[in-house]
């Protein structure tokens, strides 16, 4: 009985990991189209560099 429980637990843990990885995929990290993201779309990352004030002053000095 203990052996069957241990094997069942191992199977369920493997299935759990597979489902977690499936949930973590979106259009950015898989080949799914952006329309499949639904309402939980990832925020777009800005292509612009953030220029901080101290960096600007250092280049002006």
Image (cartoon, helix red, strand yellow):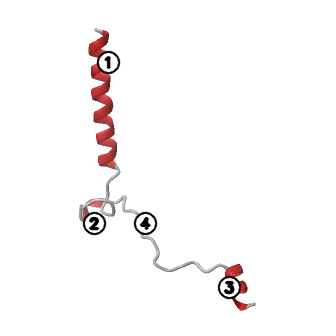
Which circle, 1 or 2, is nearer the viewer? 1
The quarter in which the C terminus is drawn is bottom right
Q: Which residue is mark 4?
A: 43
Residue at 43 percent of width and 66 percent of height: 43
The answer to whether residue 52 is left or right of residue 9 is: right
Q: Which residue is mark 2?
A: 34
CB under 8 Å between discs 1 and 3: no
Q: Which residue is mark 1?
A: 6
Residue at 28 percent of width and 59 percent of height: 30
Which circle, 2 or 3, is nearer the viewer? 3
Q: Which residue is mark 3?
A: 56
Please tell me whether mark 1 sits on a helix, a strand or a loop: helix
**Disc number at residue 15?**
none
Binning the other alpha carbons within 10 Å of mark 3 as few (below 14), some (14 to 19) or many (20 upward) gives few
Q: Earlier in the sequence, mark 4 or mark 3?
A: 4
Please tell me whether mark 4 sits on a helix, a strand or a loop: loop
Seen in the picture, residue 13 relative to 25 is either above or below; the reply is above
């Amino acid at each position: 009985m203990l052996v069957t429980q241990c094997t069942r637990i191992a199977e369920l843990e493997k299935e759990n990991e597979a489902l977690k990885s499936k949930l973590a995929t979106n259009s950015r990290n898989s080949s799914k189209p952006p329309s499949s993201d639904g309402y939980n779309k990832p925020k777009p990352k800005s292509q612009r560099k953030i220029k901080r004030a101290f960096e600007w002053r250092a280049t002006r000095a």
